[in-house]
Image: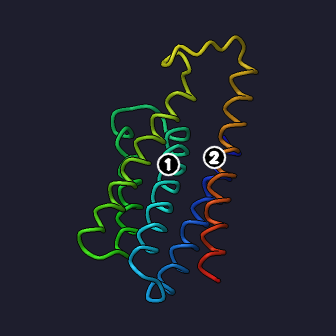
Amino acid sequence: MLLILVLLLWNVGEIIYIYGVFRKKQTLFDDRYTKTMCMALSSISSFVLALYLTLLLPLNPLTYFLPSLAGLWIGWKFGSFMKAPASLNGMYNGALGGIMGMMFGAVLQNPAICNIPIETEASFTSNLVSLVIFCAALHTLVHHFIRNSLTN
């Protein structure tokens, strides 16, 4: 749980940082570039955030919609950099990433949902940790590529 919380804070810090950088430099880019960057940022950021929220929050009906709403909010924030009709694309990618992250987190918590045989508790924990670290590394890599493209 502590590892997931640390990775959540790390990725939220990356989201806030890249949002600030993108906000500062948004007038330097054309609409096509902005749309591509916003789609990538909103989908991967909402996926990872929804995954961590699903793994950290207890399962009850009140917390079912929180990860997807967080993804929708991230998509709305990054979609606000685009012009009016295209801004819905950011919200769509954010909501879709949030729902996918929530589903992936549910499968990580209970692999029997997809008929994945887990024989021991140790293999369950190692799969959970390795996939969570992989998602954090993927999120960091995408944000690194976007930061490099923004500075060049």
- Residue at (38%, 47%) from the top-left corner? 96
Determine whether, in the image, residue 30 is placed left or right of residue 118. left
Cβ atoms at labels 1 and 2 below 8 Å apart: yes
Observer-nearest residue: 60 or 36?
A: 36
Q: Answer left or right for 41 relative to 151.
A: left
Q: Secondary structure at mark 2?
A: helix
Which dot marks residue 135?
Answer: 2
Q: Is residue 147 left or right of residue 80?
A: right
Image quadrant where one finds the N terminus: top right
Q: Position of residue 75 (x, y in %)?
A: 39, 61
The residue drawn where x is 56% and y is 73% is 18
Residues 36 and 22: in front is 36
Viewer-closest of 113 and 29: 29
Q: Nearer the viewer, residue 33 or 133?
A: 33
Q: Residues within 10 Å of mark 1 (few under 14, many from 20)?
A: many
Figure quadrant of residue 64: top left
Disc 2 crowd, CA 10 A, few/some/many (<14, 14-19, 20+): some
Q: Is residue 66 above or below residue 122?
A: below
- The amino acid type, in three-letter code, at marker 2 is Cys
Q: Which residue is situated farthest in the left direction here?
A: 85
Specify the label residue 47 is tagged with.
1
> What's the residue type where badge 1 is placed?
Phe
Q: State the CA–CA distance, disc 1 to disc 2.
A: 9 Å
- Residue at disc 1, secondary structure: helix
| Residue 125 on image: x %, y % | 71, 27
Instruction: Say if 111 sits above or below 99 in the image.
Output: above
Residue 95 in picture, x, y percent from top left = 36, 51
